[in-house]
Amino acid sequence: MNKRQKPSQKMKGATVAAVLCFVAAIAIVGTYTFNDYKRTQQKAELARVEEDRTKDEETKEPAEEANNLVVKNQDEPEEPEEPAETEPEDTDAGTENDAGTGTNAGGNAQSTAGSGMSVNFGEDSKLLWPVNGTVLMSYSMDKTVYFSTLDQYKYNPAVVISGAEGDQVLCGTTGIVKSIDVTAETGTTVNVDIGNGYELFYGQLKEVPVKVGDYVEAKSVLGYVSQPTKYYSVEGCNVYFEMRKDGQPINPVEYLEE
């Protein structure tokens, strides 16, 4: 009985061993296959990542080139625009403007454009009175004089001569109208250049018939006596008559005819 069981146990042992070998073989094959599968998957993943990176680089390159082009265009200086062509200035208009400012190429206005006239007042020349009236306030630059309207003492660079409203105001000598201004103190004031640095100022006027640049002769009407400004309301209607030499006030009475 035992003899018959021994071969059976050997067969069972062989069978178990074969099964174990088979299982081991399957496990080994499975492990190898799994590892190979993992390597294959890793390679595929790496290939996909590489492909995506390549695509990204290809996409970035045109964008970077475009950005570089924009930066380059921004850095490059713009070409300056060509200046617009301008028509030459009218020389006659320039002469008129010079007359309006009282200057010309020579420095002092001496004649109007095209007039061919010159002015040449000197130390021995004489002036006509602008109006027939009395002196209300004398020229005084060495000491102050009393201004009734202002109720104060001031220096007076002019002669203030009485006149009736509407009286003619005459030019004292030949000259060129340098400017016509309106100020709070002397109202409408005509400035006449009489040459060699001498100028005359006629203030408190109205209805002035002359214009800047006009050549005027002695006894030419420069305007008419107006109502006085608020600076001379107490003194009444008058002509403000000032004389300057090289921009400094001088006493016009010394040149007025007696």
Image (cartoon, helix red, strand yellow):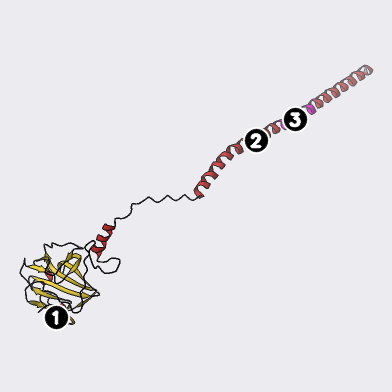
What is the C-alpha distance between the residues marked 3 and 1? 123 Å
The mark lying in front, picked from 3 and 2, is 2
| Residue receiving disc 1 | 145
Crowd rating for badge 1 (residues with CA inside 10 Å; few <14, some 14–19, many 20+):
some
Q: Amino acid at mark 2?
A: Val
For mark 1, give the secondary structure. Answer: strand
Counting from the top left corner in percent of width and height, residue 161 is at 9, 74
Crowd rating for badge 3 (residues with CA inside 10 Å; few <14, some 14–19, many 20+):
few
For mark 3, give the secondary structure. Answer: helix
Q: Residue at x 68, y 33 (%)?
A: 47
Q: Is residue 182 visible?
A: no
Q: Amino acid at mark 3?
A: Asp
> Who comes first in sequence, dot 3 or dot 1?
3
Query: Viewed as shown, does residue 172 lie left or right of 92?
Result: left
Q: Amino acid at mark 1?
A: Val
Query: Viewed as shown, does residue 117 lie left or right of 234?
Result: right
> Who comes first in sequence, dot 1 or dot 2?
2
| Residue receiving disc 3 | 36
What is the C-alpha distance between the residues marked 3 and 2? 20 Å
Q: Is residue 46 visible?
A: yes
| Residue receiving disc 2 | 49
Q: Residue 198 has which mark?
A: none
Q: Quadrant of residue 59?
A: top right
